Image (spheres, rainbow, N blue to C red):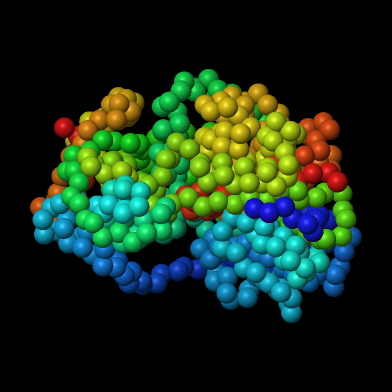
């Protein structure tokens, strides 16, 4: 990846994690969140010339092409990209608009509303209908098989318990986390309920700009793994490793120079593996790092509320709040540089890593 | 106060997925000859299972078909102890198995294991036991034509 000449800044952010708010339909939830991000940026929609959205038809229960949601994010008569994968990739899409000079300011928004559906009912339909779906493959089955490989190679029991406790404590202390409602899916062996995410309603928005602002995106990387899961090394997240490496190369940084990392993962074990993949924890030490290092997922990760495909963008917002010194009780003192990652809704096939810095 | 309305919804559509020539031949081999087939990538030389028409790592077409298995080794597994949509009544073991002669793993249900004690069953599976493809009485040309059986 070449070094970008046009700096991209983040002017505004908004994050709404809730549950079953019947006072708003989905478009109103999106409109409110984008409005808050614009207010945070001290900008009006008139100053926006690009909109990039990440959403998933199955999560929404609506076709993304139906135009139900895009106008609520400010897309009316603007250049718009619709992205059906994890929302951190949508941010990269918005960056390309700005870096190419096609736009000067972009909304990036993503959402998912777990209270409108049952994830377990449609999870299987996300997978290949010829080889995977007939066997019962779903997202948690896959994470369980990944976890089995991870947990079998080392003795993680004590670290797993401590990491889980610390994650729950961090989520409870996170003022943006879901505090009531939500639900958890069933846990296939060797996963246990404490490993699982808390399904929530999530709407998140950022305002990106070429105008100087306190937070700058200094690196971005992406990578995609093979489609066939049986072709992959499930013990490693090779795509994330490459994405993080590309982001850090562009940023001119190393993992040891990061003050905060917010790693996306469906389960606690996936978060630990993600931490190792980006080089912030040594191989086999991801759970221990999650347990002991307050710089790792200070937001509480998936325990704070989870809904694809918004989570990569949520991790980015949590990182930015750290750099702005506005993270609350979980604030990492003096944080200046952070990495956030997002992995695709289906089986972590695609990965995006973003490095942000206080300008 | 305004009564807040929720409207029930349900998606139920029919699809017809084209398996394609390579998968059709793979399933035909299951049904007619009870054989597991892979293809050898001309570039990386890996034997890819299930057989497919291209190697996505090398971005090369594949044409060299080879039989693999019917025995192989468990790579990783999970045990479903709760009911999951579309799955048999729990407990159920599903696993990725690499057949002898193959370089990639294939997913299927594992049978032949005493699941009365999940922990004991997991211990046995963690040892990466060998399994054999065991076919159903009347194969239909689907991935469910066989399961993995411990021996």
What percent of the width, then of the height, locates residue A153? 43, 26
Res. B91 visible in picture: no
Q: Is residue B59 left or right of residue A112?
A: left
> For this view, does A156 lie left or right of residue A97?
left
In this view, the residue in front, A65 or B61, is B61
Closer to the camera in the image, A197 or A46: A46
The residue at the point 60 percent across, 38 percent down is: A278
Residue at 25% x, 30% y is B129
Q: Nearer the viewer, residue B128 or B101?
A: B101
Asked if residue A144 lies left or right of residue A218, the reply is left
Residue B117, how many percent across, how many down?
A: 29, 27
Which residue extends farthest bottom? A77
Res A266 seen here = yes
* Residue A145 placement (x, y as % from top left): 40, 39
Identity of the residue drawn at 69% across and 36% down: A254
Q: Residue at position x 24%, y 52% from top?
A: B38
């Amino acid at each position: 990846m070449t070094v970008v000449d046009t700096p991209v800044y983040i002017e505004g952010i908004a994050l709404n994690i809730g549950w079953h708010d019947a006072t708003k339909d989905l478009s109103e939830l999106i409109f409110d969140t984008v409005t808050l991000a614009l207010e945070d940026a001290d900008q009006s929609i008139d100053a926006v010339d690009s909109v990039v959205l990440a959403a998933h038809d199955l999560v929404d229960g609506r076709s993304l092409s139906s135009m139900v949601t895009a106008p609520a994010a400010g897309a009316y008569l603007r250049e718009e990209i619709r992205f059906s994968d994890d929302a951190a990739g949508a941010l990269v899409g918005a960056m390309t608009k700005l870096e190419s000079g096609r736009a000067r300011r972009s909304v990036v928004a993503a959402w998912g509303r777990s209270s409108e559906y049952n994830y377990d009912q449609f999870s299987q339909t996300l997978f290949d209908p010829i080889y995977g779906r007939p066997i019962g493959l779903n997202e948690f089955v896959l994470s369980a098989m990944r976890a089995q490989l991870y947990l079998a190679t080392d003795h993680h029991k004590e670290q797993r318990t401590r990491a889980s406790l610390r994650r729950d404590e961090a989520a409870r202390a996170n003022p943006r986390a879901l505090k009531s409602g939500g639900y958890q899916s069933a846990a296939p062996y060797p996963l246990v309920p404490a490993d699982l995410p808390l399904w929530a309603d999530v709407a998140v928005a950022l305002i990106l700009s070429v105008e100087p602002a306190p937070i700058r995106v200094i690196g971005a990387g992406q990578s995609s793994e093979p489609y066939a899961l049986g072709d992959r090394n499930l013990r490693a997240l090779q795509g994330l490793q490459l994405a993080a490496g590309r982001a850090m190369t562009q940023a001119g940084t190393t993992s040891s120079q990061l003050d905060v990392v917010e790693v996306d993962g469906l389960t606690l074990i996936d978060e630990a593996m993600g931490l190792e993949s980006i080089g912030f924890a040594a191989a086999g030490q991801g759970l221990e790092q999650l347990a002991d290092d307050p710089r790792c997922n200070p937001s509480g990760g998936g325990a704070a509320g989870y809904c694809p495909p918004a989570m990569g963008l949520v991790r980015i917002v949590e990182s930015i709040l750290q750099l702005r010194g506005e993270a609350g009780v979980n604030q990492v003192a003096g944080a200046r540089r952070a990495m956030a990652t997002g992995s695709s809704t289906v089986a972590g096939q695609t990965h995006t890593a973003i490095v942000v810095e206080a300008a | 106060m305004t009564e807040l309305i929720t409207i029930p919804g349900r998606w139920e559509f029919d699809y017809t997925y084209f398996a394609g020539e390579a998968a059709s031949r793979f399933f035909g081999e299951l049904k007619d000859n009870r054989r597991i087939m892979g293809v050898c990538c001309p570039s990386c030389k890996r034997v890819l299972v299930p057989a497919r028409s291209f190697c996505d790592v090398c971005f090369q077409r594949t044409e060299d078909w080879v039989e693999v298995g019917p025995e192989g080794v468990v790579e990783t597994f999970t045990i479903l102890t709760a009911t999951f949509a579309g799955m048999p009544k729990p407990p159920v073991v599903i696993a990725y198995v690499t057949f002898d002669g193959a370089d990639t793993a294939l997913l299927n249900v594992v049978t032949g294991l005493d699941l009365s004690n999940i922990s004991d069953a997991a211990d046995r599976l963690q040892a990466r036991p060998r399994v054999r493809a065991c076919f159903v009485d009347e194969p239909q040309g689907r991935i469910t034509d066989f399961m993995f059986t411990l021996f």
